[in-house]
Amino acid sequence: MMNLADAAKLTHADWQEKAANLKKTAETRLFIGGKFVDAVEGGTFDNICPVDGSIINTCAAGTEADINKAVEIARISFKSGEWSRMAPRDRMNVMYTWAQLIGENGAELSLMDTIDMGKPISDMVGIDMPMCIDTVQYFAECIDKITGTVTATEYDVISAVLREPIGVVGCISPWNYPLLMALWKIAPSLAAGNSTILKPAEQSPLSCYRAAELFVEAGGPAGALQVINGLGEQAGQALARHMDVSKISFTGSTEVGKLMHVYSGESNMKKVSLECGGKGPQVFCEDLEGELMDRAVETAINGIFFNMGEVCSAGSRLIVHSKIYDTFVAKFIEKGKHAYVCGDPLDPEVNLGPLVDHEAQKRVLDMLETARNEGGQVEFGGTAPDGDLDKGAYIVPTMITGVKSNDTIAQHEAFAPVVAVIRVDSDDEAIEVANNSIYGLQGSVWTDNYRKAMRFVREIECGTFLVNSFEEGDMTQPFGGYKQSGNAKDKCFESLLSYTNAKAAWFRLN
Ligand code: NAD
């Protein structure tokens, strides 16, 4: 057990040694009814390391049979009231203890995500894990702030609106922030009193298993949180189609998100919450200069290269006014070309790991080829690195200029450290280009003119919009998309309420 403060002092060699041990000891079976068990049908799949293509370990592959087993346990647990009817204070205490245990095991959980999907260990220790702890604490704090209402009625009636947990909730999460994205779903679901089943991304199950084990250690009932890894089309689909699952909360691609509506419609009309893809526009206006210009460039670099660009809200489209275009591009090249350097994510000095797998690397290399064919100029990057890293799924940070709004690289998520730069001649054109997307997750504008900024806030269609900033926000703010970026909000109190049902109770008194 090692907390984050001690983890921050570890060296590359320390992490390598810990990783070698963890690969042998990490639990890879399904977490059902508070125990780790093999899949009913006995299936397994290899968990591949994106750094060198080696096999990390072999994971149990859950299928419909395992989902059925877990849903039955979850349903019994929900009906028993052991979690769903627990006094709010007691439920809060379990969740606070859980947050504390996550912190105390911060080094191990960080390492799990790093070896699974290649995220730099320093980002795990310094960024992801503190956010994971915040998430659980925030939703714990919210538990006794859920209130119903008494509505206006005639004298002899009391009409109360009660907030109740929904029942069995299925959560399906992606691999780009393995534990954090899972917690953005399971923490509010549990806080609301639901029996929750998580299907993590098959590329990154380890930290979710450990976190579920810690929930039980914190005093949570075994039937309240279960984790079943497996392929999306099998375990994920079975969960989303299950007749006894009352809500499915999904984070992942828009393509798979749309299937959730199909599964719901073809089964029991379960509620569907979706957090999907993005193609974040950042607009840089003609008045940008001096310190604000420098900060804009620096923020834009981090906004696309951080976390290997595998961020749903990444600023992957830079929309730059022609008056400042040459200066902006020159500064971005000067500062951005060497700001992020590929390396072993277990080295605390490294800020850019590989993509999640070799399939993603091939998809991105193909996209870059298409970008060139469509007239884009690669200002830097555009390839996989050679030399020592050639076995890994790496992509060198890449800047493409001369991109047109309808080009493939401006329309499709690369989910990689690849930025597309589009030149515009007016604010009207910037707004049109920014909105020319099926997505609407996060955007920004950079200008000293706040009247202009307000126009962008009003007119750009996205769930989060920032002025002279890009990556900010805390647990109180809703995070979620417009358009095909999704239909729900994570974080925030509103998210917690989405894991409850409103029941109208009518008391006639005379
Ligand atoms: P994905 O859609 O391929 O997979 C997401 C999850 O869905 C995984 O657990 C997967 O196993 C499961 N799945 C796949 N096919 C399924 C099916 N047929 N039925 C049921 N489940 C299925 O996405 P990914 O590659 O893991 O993640 C990257 C995507 O996630 C990107 O598009 C990114 O923008 C998006 N994302 C969005 C947010 C947000 O908050 N809006 C946050 C993180 C990631």
Image: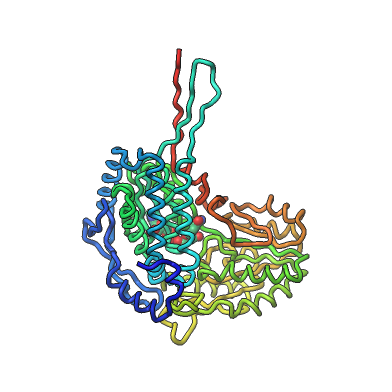
Nearer to the camera, 72 or 369: 72
Q: Quadrant of residue 317?
A: bottom right
**Horizontal and vertical percent position of residue 28:** 29, 64
Q: Residue at x 55, y 59 (%)?
A: 278
Nearer to the camera, 443 or 407: 443
Left or right: 292 as drawn, with respect to 337: right
- Residue 462 visible somewhere in the drawing: yes
- Residue 355 visible somewhere in the drawing: no
Q: Against 8, is 131 above or below?
A: above
Q: Which quadrant holds the N terminus?
A: bottom left
Q: What is the total number of numbered labels drawn onto the structure image?
A: 0
Question: Which residue ends up furthest to the bottom in the rendered image?
Answer: 387
Q: Residue at x 52, y 60 (%)?
A: 312
Question: Which residue ends up furthest to the top in the rendered image?
Answer: 510
Q: Quadrant of residue 5?
A: bottom left
Q: How is the image coloured?
A: rainbow
Q: Against 220, is 287 above or below?
A: below
Q: Residue at x 76, y 61 (%)?
A: 448
**Horizontal and vertical percent position of residue 452:** 76, 55
State ligand 1's quadrant.
bottom left
Q: Residue at x 38, y 45 (%)?
A: 91
**Horizontal and vertical percent position of residue 203:** 37, 65
**Horizontal and vertical percent position of residue 506:** 45, 23
Nearer to the camera, 381 or 412: 381
Left or right: 417 as drawn, with respect to 282: left
Q: Which quadrant holds the C terminus?
A: top left
Nearer to the camera, 153 or 142: 142
